[in-house]
Image (cartoon, rainbow, N blue to C red):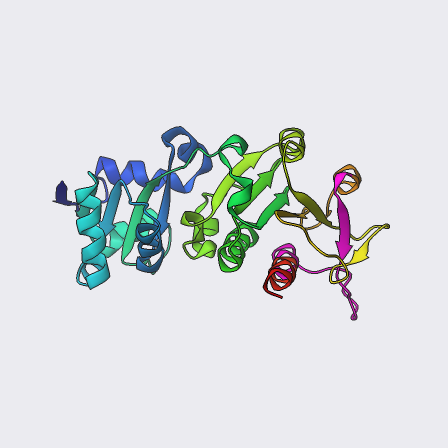
Amino acid sequence: MRRSTIESLSNPLVKRMRLLREKRHRRAEGLFLAEGLRIATEAREAGVLPQWLFLGPEGAAHPLAKALADATMAAGGEVIDTTPAILSKLSGKDNPQTIVGIYAEPETTLADLDRDAAPIWLVAERLRDPGNLGTMLRTGDAVGAGGLILLDDSTDPYAVEAVRASMGAIFTQKLVVARWEEFLPWLRQGPGQLVATWLGGDTEDYQAVRYAAPTFILTGNESQGLPPAYAAAADVRVKMPMLGKADSLNAAIATAVMAYEVLNQRRN
């Protein structure tokens, strides 16, 4: 176990860790940054501990922070007492949280998933907004989903904004990045109903369908929706009634509405 103090902004470790705000450095290091006591506590409760834990003066005094620091050191990680200025440099925020953790990026593949472990799985295609991605993870956690499968050129799930928006669900949900050409053959190798949210023809009202477990809810790109070929490959295509002038819901909201409809059918 190790505990140290860093107060210099020019410290080599601080310089190295602040680069994790950029995707290429996260990929090179295999690490990502998560800030805040709530998110770090969610991670600890999920059995995930940081390799480095930076604590500000206020954060270090909290009982949950002490438990987190003890667990981090017991697992071989390093706890670093530091200053608000360094926390600001790490997080890129003027008013940073009092805790910043540096975590290893999981390397989960489709082959690692147990589709029978949960009745609901979320699938997003070319998701571009990190806030939407984090919200989908949070929704998945709320409905007891198995995880989120990101298809094609989606935004980086380990960007600081996505991790922050997930409110800790980045640690409770399985997360896989794959291509459509990999996902569809994998899905068809076992049980799984693919349900596409779709504004085109050949759709059913989302509440008129009886969903079969495991249900894979497929949501398309925020501005373009799903490619027609992806929608055609689904077992069923559904849409939600839009009674106002808007023709569609935000991607994360549409996913949440669908996920709760599937959940409610299970409950009833």
Quarter placement of the C terminus: bottom right
Magenta-span inclusion, residue 224? no
State left or right for residue 66 relative to residue 100: left
Q: Is residue 123 visible?
A: yes
State left or right for residue 204 relative to residue 72: right
- Residue 242 or 141: which is nearer the viewer? 141
Number of marks in picture? 0
Give coordinates of residue 210: x percent, y percent.
Answer: 72, 56
Give coordinates of residue 228: x percent, y percent.
Answer: 79, 41
- Residue 59 or 238: which is nearer the viewer? 238
Quarter placement of the N terminus: top left
State left or right for residue 81 relative to residue 257: left
Extreme residue toward the right, this view: 201
Q: Residue at x 21, y 39 (%)?
A: 11
Q: Is residue 56 visible?
A: no
Extreme residue toward the front, this view: 268
Q: Residue at x 36, y 31 (%)?
A: 29
Magenta-span inclusion, residue 236? yes
State left or right for residue 9 relative to residue 240: left
Part of the protein shown in magenta: 233-257
Give coordinates of residue 167: x percent, y percent.
Answer: 43, 57
Give coordinates of residue 92: x percent, y percent.
Answer: 37, 50
